[in-house]
Amino acid sequence: MMFYDYTSTLILIVYALLLAAVVVVLVILVRLALAGTRALNAYTERTKIETAMMLAFDGDDAEPGDGTEPGTTPTA
């Protein structure tokens, strides 16, 4: 009576499972990197907007003589 040697089949299954685990880990790392990139882009956009608003309302665009120059107190 002959018995089939399952050693090569088991090794193949173990390698396939290891390959699947590596692929899952890589997919998770790529998704984390993309999420980090999106978060960084959102933060950068927010700081750009905040900077633009600060520059828009800093009083540098006052007309001479209207009492709104930097360092003066406007009189109504």
Image (tube, rainbow, N blue to C red):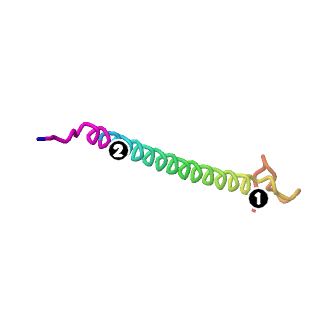
Rendered location of residue 7, percent (x, y)? 25, 36
Q: Which sits in the foreground, 4 or 6? A: 4
User: Which of the numbered marks, if any, corresponds to residue 29?
Assistant: none
Rendered location of residue 28, percent (x, y)? 42, 47
Q: Residue at x 76, y 56 (%)?
A: 74
Depth-wise, is mark 2 or mark 1 nearer the camera?
2
Disc 2 and disc 1 in contact, CB within 8 angstroms: no
Q: Which residue of the protein is positioned furthest toward the right in this rendering?
A: 64
Q: Residue at x 76, y 58 (%)?
A: 75
| Label 1 crowd bin: few (<14), some (14–19), many (20+), radius 10 Å | few
Rendered location of residue 33, percent (x, y)? 51, 46
Q: Earlier in the sequence, mark 2 or mark 1?
A: 2
In which quadrant will I find the N terminus? top left
Is residue 7 rendered to the left or right of residue 31? Answer: left
Q: Which residue is mark 1?
A: 75
The magenta stretch spans which residues? 2-13
Q: Is residue 17 above or below residue 62?
A: above
Q: Residue at x 39, y 43 (%)?
A: 19
In the rendered image, residue 4 lying in the magenta stretch gets the answer yes
Q: Amino acid at mark 2?
A: Ala
Quadrant of the rendered image containing residue 66: bottom right
Is residue 71 rendered to the left or right of residue 42? Answer: right
Q: Which residue is mark 2?
A: 16
Q: Secondary structure at mark 1?
A: loop
In which quadrant will I find the C terminus? bottom right
Q: Amino acid at mark 1?
A: Thr
Q: Is residue 73 above or below residue 8?
A: below
Using the numbered discs, state the Cα–Cα distance from disc 2 to disc 1 in whole angstroms: 80 Å
In the rendered image, residue 8 lying in the magenta stretch gets the answer yes
Q: Residue at x 64, y 53 (%)?
A: 50
Q: Secondary structure at mark 2?
A: helix
